[in-house]
Image (tube, helix red, strand yellow):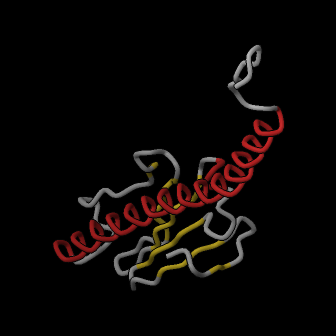
Amino acid sequence: MKRGQSKVFGFSLIELLVAVAIVGILAAIAYPAYQSTVQRSKRSDAKVELTDAAQRLERCFTRFGAYNNAACGLSDYTTEIGDYKITVSDLTATTYTLTATALTTSQKNDKDCVVLTLDHTGLQGSKNASGTATSGCW
């Protein structure tokens, strides 16, 4: 270095703007992927709840010979995390339908998988927000 010159340390404005732009682009790609992963994991919780309720009803049928026996006592409930409401419908001695309906905004934004169903035959189904049957949720 020549006498009287000092070494400059730091970043120029251009370098800083480039770094901010790169971080912005990465965030724009990563955040939707993160949201999708969170939705799928919460959907998985709903599927676990549906399967658990179905197993309880199957145990009831094995023990009492009917799904709707009063000793079984399965009624509508909200999942532990609170993202889905589990309802029991079409409950007779030989049939039932379990439904998981999204309650939270994040799960209602899960476009194709707002409602998940499971029946006494093991048939799995799903519907979007408008009530149209969809596939790929299970």
Give the image location of residue 108, x and y in percent: 66, 56
Q: Residue furthest right?
A: 14
In-image side of 88 versus 33 (left or right): left
Name the residue nearer the viewer: 134 or 62: 134
Relative to 16, residue 46 above or below: below
Q: Residue furthest top?
A: 4
Relative to 90, residue 85 above or below: above
Name the residue nearer the viewer: 106 or 2: 2
Relative to 12, residue 92 above or below: below
Rendered image quadrant of residue 76: bottom left
In-image side of 31 versus 17 (left or right): left
Rendered image quadrant of residue 29: bottom right
Name the residue nearer the viewer: 99 or 109: 109
Residue drawn at point x = 34 percent, y = 64 percent: 53
Give the image location of residue 32, x and y in percent: 66, 56
Relative to 91, residue 94 above or below: below
